[in-house]
Image (cartoon, grey):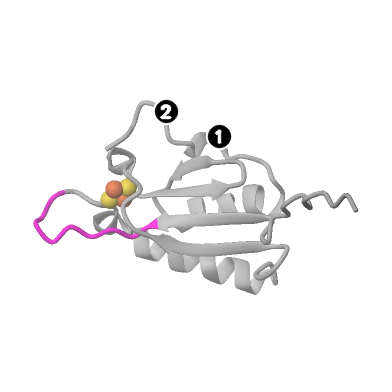
Amino acid sequence: MNQSTPEPTSYYERHIFFCLNERKNGEDCCAQHKAQEGFERCKLQIKEAGLSGKGHVRVNKAGCLDRCAAGPVAVVYPEAVWYTFVDAADIDEIVESHLKNGKVVDRLVVPDHLGR
Ligand code: FES
């Protein structure tokens, strides 16, 4: 019997990770730039839209993603699009445009050269 390995399927349609890293030594970090507020706003928006869970969107905390120079940052998979954000309106746009409709929010994308 010839059994082929099934293609892996994505449990979530999209997965967004927010860096919430805080540096106790006073060095710059996403936690100093309202990362927590952005994370909570995103989580709430996804929940209220009924988009959480299998086959939909997952919003997760992360430690340092090593792109601190662009902080606060969040990354969306499977597209691997890196965002920065300033306020609730930015988060709402990421949710509405990308997480709900798959359209990248170009104005919030982190430039490739920004790392740590
Ligand atoms: S502290 Fe957020 S990416 Fe490093």
- Can you see residue 42? no
Task: Say whether residue 71 is visible.
Answer: yes
Residue closest to the far top: 113
Distance, label 1 to label 2, CA atoms, is: 13 Å
| Image position, residue 96 (x, y; %) | 64, 54
Q: Residues within 10 Å of mark 2 (few under 14, many from 20)?
A: few
Q: Which residues are magenta?
A: 19-27
- As helix, strand or loop, the secondary structure at mark 2 comes to loop
- Nearer the camera: disc 1 or disc 2: 2
Identify residue type, mark 2.
Asp
Residue shown at 33% from the left, 58% from the top? 63
Compared across the picture, whether 49 is left or right of 83 comes to right
Q: Amino acid at mark 1?
A: Asp
The residue where tag 2 is placed is: 112
Q: Which mark is residue 86?
A: none
**Residue under the point 68% across and 61% down:** 11
Q: Which mark is residue 106?
A: 1
Quadrant (top left/top right/bottom left/bottom right) for the C terminus = top left
Indicate yes or no whether the magenta region holds residue 20: yes
Q: Position of residue 8 (x, y in %)?
A: 72, 52
The residue positioned 65% from the left and 48% from the top of the image is 97
Tell me which numbered mark, 1 or 2, is placed earlier along the sequence: 1
Q: Quadrant of residue 21?
A: bottom left
Label 1 element class: helix
